[in-house]
Amino acid sequence: MLRVVSFLILIALAAAGAAWVADQTGDVILTWGNLRAKTTVPVFVFGLGLLAVIAIFAWSILSAIWRTPAQMRRRRHEKRHARGRHAITHGLLAIGHGDTALARRHADAARRHAPDDPLALLLHAQSAQLDGNRDEAQRAFRAMAERPDTRLLGLRGLFIEAQRADDAVSAVMIAEEAIKLSPSSTWASQAVLGFRCARSDWSGALAILDSNLSAGLIDKKAWRRQRGVLLTARALELETMDRDVARESVMEAVKLAPTLVPAASLAAKFESEAHQVRRAMKLVEAAWLAHPHPDLADAYAHVKLGDSARQRLQRMETLAAKTPGHVEGQLALARAAIDASEFARAREALAPLINDPTQRVALLMAEIERAEHGDSGRARAWTLRAVRARHDPAWTADGYVSNRWRPVSPVTGRLDAFQWQTPVASLPSDKGTTIEASPFEEAMLAAPPPKRITVSSEPLEPVQPAPAPAAQDNLPPAPRVSEVKSPEAKPLETKPLETKPSEVKATESSSEAKTVDVKASEAPEPATAATELAKSTPEPAESAPIAATPVFRARADLGKPASSPIPAVIPIIRAPDDPGIDDEGPSDEFTEQIGTPKAQAGGWRGFWSRWGR
């Protein structure tokens, strides 16, 4: 609206000016040497305006001609720059989706069209890294480090390449140079801090940590925790060399980070040696409530030097009561109970954990079995379960499992990275699969404790062997070998090869199963035994006496019809001391039918020897 009003005002002024010029009277005379021109005022004003327009138009043409070369150069430069930007954009996209050839082609185009663009240098370096050409990548990063605008980026690239080449000296030098250039650089400060911790330069690490706080890289809470970690590391290193400095460091650490487990346990140890028992117990209890740990339990148990095992057990009961139901409390209580020979109390503490035991639980149960009853068998069974049981929590950082606490991660150099947790590889699956005990382990664990056996020096009376139990209620007991007389035994008779399948009948479910012309004793044959001979059985040269109930090994004839009542697979039954058959021992069916295997030893050997022939 303002523009419209302004335009109307200008038009009105122009119209008023034109009217004023038109109303003027008089003539205008121009004299130039012998030339004389006379005109009116309106005509003169119109001619003057036309001359101004022509002059402006001519000046525009001349200036355009003068600026044409510069414009052509600028347009060519802009076109090259646009091509370079296009190559950089598509090259970075190619690096993002891993196309090495396309990234290299765009990097060459960017370097040709935009050689001074910092992004072109970055694209060239990253494409060389993607292609595996480290020398080319280092040259590109060095070129970036020489430019003021990309110096920090080039140093970071050189730092990464030094790490990939396992050149720790060059890496730390580059990181220190980056810190001088930019103290607020996070990656450089972390790298220098990690390297100083790796060299056990705790004073230098503390200085870097203070500079990070000043630069605003970490907050006050994180600074307190990390400073406590560094002081604890220095105290652990100087524990055996300079105990005064170690004590001073760990006392400051436990004030900054009271829940840090190694700081609390070491501080409690120093307080215990100074006979400050109550102070030591308070330090351990504060850390225990936050993170129950075996080291804290051990420090709490031995907080007062010279205490008996029962006194340590009472102290452990107090500590475990502060975190009821926690695994570490139950394990610490069981450990103290075993040391005090309170095995019932130890079993009670481990009772909620034995259904799905970890390695420490299984080993404690093995120790209880060995110490309480001297049962090495059950102890071995628990030891076997410990081999296959779930892992206990351990100090873990970035997938690295350590047997002791460390201030920095050896994988990434991150400070305060170790946590007390179960390793990832030993976590249960989504299906909740648990490792069950083997049948041997179950049998060993279910067996009662062994009893003491007193050996007497008096001569023992001969014990008559008891008769074998009958397989069924309607069967008499099997006679012993000494009661079987050879003349009374009947020879084994078999049918010739022409025996028809209809003549051989065996019914498993009937108690009146028939045998194949077997006359051995008056006792009936059990219905569940295999009582048929194969049709291809040859006629034995001499018959062997069979004592008590006859049991035979039946073989399936490969040529018999499918309707044959003889099963295709029949279990092999033999005497346990027969060396000529398989080594798996007698089956349950054999024991139920004929009782003690030794009563049939003689007859079975002769029968199997003739069968083998």
Image (spheres, helix red, strand yellow):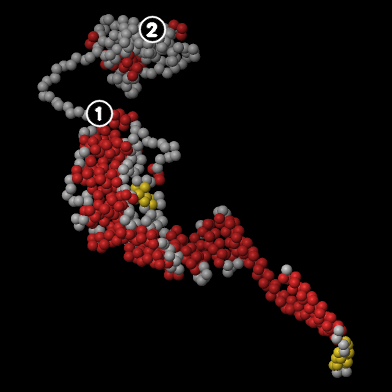
**Relative side of 125 to 426, left or right:** right
x 56%, y 64%: residue: 119
In the rendered image, the vertical position of residue 248 relative to residue 496, given as above or below:
below
Residue 378 place in picture, x, y as percent: 26, 33
Q: Which residue is rendered at x = 71% and y = 77% of the image? A: 67
In the image, taking residue 481 as reference, residue 31 lies left or right, namely right
Q: In the shown orientation, is residue 33 left or right of residue 214?
A: right
Tell me the residue that label 1 is attached to. 448
**Position in image of residue 545 (x %, y %):** 30, 9
Residue 59 sits in which quadrant? bottom right
- Relative to 22, residue 436 above or below: above
In the rendered image, the quadrant that contains the N terminus is bottom right
| Picture residue at 25% right of the left edge, 50% below the top | 299
Using the rendered image of the protein, determine whether residue 315 is visible from the camera's viewpoint: yes
The front one of 29 and 461 is 29
Q: Which residue is drawn at 33% across and 23% down?
A: 583
> Could you tell me the amino acid type at mark 1?
Pro
The image quadrant that residue 105 belongs to is bottom right
**In the image, farthest residue toward the left:** 458
Residue that mark 2 sits on: 512
Disc 2 is placed on an element classified as loop
Task: For label 1, count other residues whose C-alpha is less than 10 Å away and answer few (under 14), some (14-19) or many (20+).
Answer: few
User: In the structure shown, which secondary structural element does the residue marked by tag 1 occupy?
Assistant: loop
Instruction: Kindly identify the amino acid type of the residue bearing the numbered disc 2.
Output: Glu
Q: Where is residue 203 in the image (x, y as percent from the top left)?
A: 32, 65
Q: In this picture, is 320 found above or below 382?
A: below
Q: Can residue 238 be seen?
A: no
Residue placed most toward the observer, 21 or 269: 21
